Image (spheres, rainbow, N blue to C red):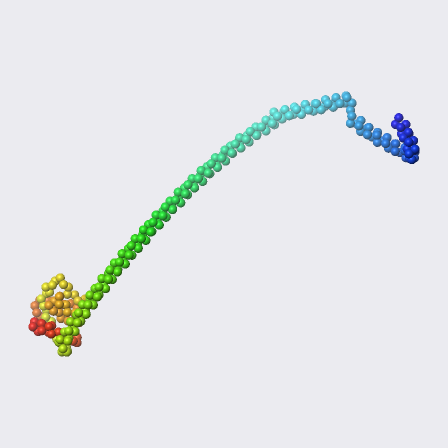
Amino acid sequence: MVWSTARSKVGLDDRKGFTTQQSEVIVSALVKIMNINLDMIYKDMVTKVQQEIALQQVMSHIGAVKKDMIILEKSEFSALRSENEKIKLELQQIKKQVTDEITKVRADNKLNLNLEKSRVKELYSQNERKLLEMRTEIVELHAQQDRALTQTDRKIDTEVADLKTMLESHKLDNIKYLAGQVEGGSEGLWSTSILELPKCQQTSTSCSMSEQSPLILNMQCCNYMEIIEDDNQCLHSAPLKSKEEDFGFLGSVPSWYRKQNIGNE
């Protein structure tokens, strides 16, 4: 039928302008292609018996796989599950340890921070106390300096007053001495006996002339005093004693001194 169809097709092709040889070649090629396609289709297709056999083989393979899975579940899966449980327990323990360590570190840090704060506060209070003590010492030193300056000022004022008094006394003594020189005239050098008078009755008055000029006549200390350049003290002793000495200084002897001295001799 295919061949007849091909022959009729060739006749049609002849009518359409193809030659007989060309029509046969085309038809043979189409036949080959169709046969190849049919062979491929038949190759993938099986019979019912073959399908049942293949189905039984597949079912047997599935049963074997199920058995293997059951065995694995009972052996390897159980081992894996136990390992997983162990790992979970270890992870929980590690997590607990890490949590404890974190808590401990936080507590230690908090304690150290509190200790450091207390130490800083103590140092601050100590520094405040030291600063207060230093301020107190500085105030006390200023007060002492002020007192010392006040005392020094008072002492200076006292010394100045004493010096002024001494200056006035020296002025008065010099005036007396100059008056004696004017009264006695120019008699040149003079000599006299050193008369040792009785002890001064005014025991409360010092006869020291260390702060006076050797020319000062201290009438409050003795009845009279002899003027000596090298000695600044009054001459005291009991009974009269005659001793000639020259007073080696220029100037006249006051008349009251000369008269009193001559009268005592």
Q: Is residue 264 above or below residue 140?
A: below
| Residue 213 visible, this orientation | no
Q: Nearer the viewer, residue 29 or 102?
A: 29
Q: Is residue 91 above or below residue 245?
A: above
* Residue 11, quarter of the rendered image: top right
* Residue pictured at 89% horizontal, 28% vertical: 5
Q: Nearer the viewer, residue 77 or 225?
A: 225
* Residue pictured at 36% horizontal, 48% vertical: 128
* Residue pictured at 61% horizontal, 25% vertical: 74
**Relative image position of residue 77 (x, y in whole percent):** 60, 27
* Residue 88, quarter of the rendered image: top right
Q: Is residue 143 above or below residue 75?
A: below
Q: Is residue 46 left or right of residue 245?
A: right
* Residue 205, quarter of the rendered image: bottom left
* Residue pictured at 47% horizontal, 36% vertical: 103
Q: Nearer the viewer, residue 225 or 196?
A: 225
Q: Is residue 104 left or right of residue 15?
A: left
Q: Is residue 26 above or below residue 158?
A: above
